[in-house]
Image (cartoon, rainbow, N blue to C red):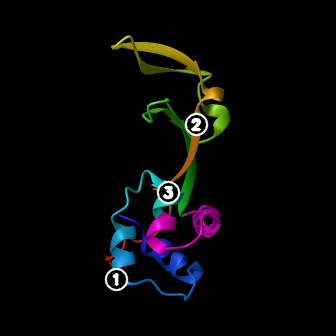
Amino acid sequence: MLSNKFLQTISKLVPGGTLSAKELQLLSSLNPDKIYVENVRSILGVSHRSAVRILETAVRQGLFKRGIEIQCPDGTVAASADAEEKLPVTVHCWTEEEGHPKEVELPTESLTKTTFYRLNDESDSITFGQTA
């Protein structure tokens, strides 16, 4: 569950300054360990740039931490880390060769990288819906 402080931060940054009950519900249902820009963009109906601004504001305020993941060609996540330099040099992925699955080792630099955000467990925020 996302924090009350984060939802308040989003409310301040969203055009119009308020979130609908549906937006609050959808945001609260996001996995707090893997929040993607596209999810926030889609829920709030804002541009990619605005969604990144909202999430980066939450990072600056200590509510979220930023992470990065590497995806195999089939879209599965092969590795994730707090920073790009902490990712492995190579990862193992599965491909299909002549109708048979085959494990291959691929350099991470050749694969798709996706930034994600996660709730900072160390923040002093209150879970949405709780009282102090």
The mark that comes first in sequence, 1 or 3, is 1
Mark 2 and mark 1: Cα distance apart in space: 34 Å
- Which quarter of the figure has residue 60? bottom right
Sequence-wise, the earlier of marks 2 and 1 is 1
Identified at 54% across, 87% down, the residue is 17
Question: Looking at numbered disc 3 in the image, what kind of residue is underneath it?
Answer: Asn
Q: Amino acid at mark 2?
A: Thr
Between circles 2 and 1, the one closer to the viewer is 2
Residue pictured at 55% horizontal, 89% vertical: 16
Q: Is residue 51 magenta?
A: yes
Q: Residues within 10 Å of mark 1 (few under 14, many from 20)?
A: few
Which corner quadrant holds the C terminus?
bottom left
The residue stretch that appears in magenta: 40-62
In the picture provided, is 85 more to the left or to the right than 45? right
Tag 3 residue: 120
| Numbered circle sitting on residue 112 | 2
Which of the marked residues, 2 or 3, is nearer the chain's N terminus? 2
Element type where label 2 sits in the image? strand
Q: Is residue 117 within the magenta segment?
A: no
What is the tally of numbered marks visible in this picture?
Answer: 3
Image-based side of 9 in relation to 85, left or right: left
Residue at the disc numbered 1: 21
